[in-house]
Amino acid sequence: MKIISSETNIDFMGKIKMTMTISGLVILIGLGSIALSGGLKYGIDFAGGTLIQLKFKTPPDIEVIRDGLKTISLGESTIQEFGSKRDILIRIQRSEEKLEAVGSKVRNSLGGKFNKEDITVERVEMVGPKVGRDLREKALLSILYAIIGIVIYISWRFELQYAIAAIIALAHDVLVTLGAFSILDKEFTLVIIAAFLAIIGYSLNDTIVVFDRIRENQGKYRKKSFEETINLSITETLSRTLITSGTTLLVVLSLFLLGGEIIHDFAFALLVGVLIGTYSSIYVASPLAVLLTKLAPPAGTAPATS
């Protein structure tokens, strides 16, 4: 099914300066937010500590909860709503007690402020600082190994110039999504790492489809300039891109709106990633392929001309 005819003439490459400027600004804003925040907001998976989820029969006052927790020695803690106003998350930097004891201790400490029967301990999770550090390192390595594998694959299937363009586009997608998490003060957890790996795979798939058509059209239209070939290739694959991205977004948007608080951030990461990945395969990877091919034409070919 074709939404856009391949005969349509869209000058994607003519908008390179504008799109590159927009991408650069978005990335700088995201990195600025991360720097001003003192880094990413790590979840308990990476930072270590104890997480307690409470459910109240009626929406409680967070300040009253904070006052109630002062009666027990739990160290620094953060308190926030989790989904509905009746669900409360309490994060403690560390605790030497057993999980059941921590939950009971928190519930008992709030007995003077609320009716204990109105408070339910939904879950208690604990991660040591050493385990959190180890998980952080392994999460970063998983992304690094994925990128190395991608470089090897694209260099073998296409040329090194295309591999470099694809990797920069993937880095662009990751940085924009990280920036969105920092700006909106969302937690970075193991689940989000899974979302990032899914984003990398999705974005790469879209980029390879475009690159494959570019290579095919270079053999068919030898008299066209590289920019004209890329414009044609993107236009020919645009219907497929819009249908694939559109149906994927419908699913991810449904998860984001209806999936509940547990997968809310995961769905948000995918939502941003799919949108940015679709954009980058057209306006980041392809323009970079033009630039790199002009700077270093593949062996046996003439330099690309404008």
Image (tube, rainbow, N blue to C red):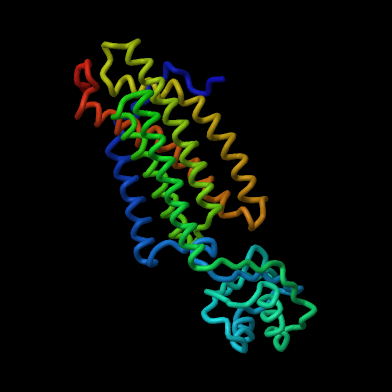
Looking at the image, residue 6 lies above or below residue 173: above
Q: Position of residue 210 (x, y in %)?
A: 41, 26
Residue found 58% across the figure and 85% down from its top: 73
Q: Position of residue 276 (x, y in %)?
A: 44, 42
Specify the quadrant that holds the N terminus.
top right
- Quadrant assignment, res 145: top left
- Quadrant assignment, res 224: top left
- The answer to whether 168 appears left or right of 97 in the picture is left
Q: Position of residue 5 (x, y in %)?
A: 47, 18
Residue found 34% across the figure and 60% down from its top: 32
- The answer to whether 276 appears left or right of 64 in the picture is left
Residue found 39% across the figure and 49% down from its top: 175
- The answer to whether 241 appears left or right of 18 in the picture is right
Specify the quadrant that holds the C terminus.
top left
Residue found 73% across the figure and 85% down from its top: 111
- Quadrant assignment, res 18: top left
Q: Position of residue 17 (x, y in %)?
A: 27, 38
Residue projecting furthest to the right = 117
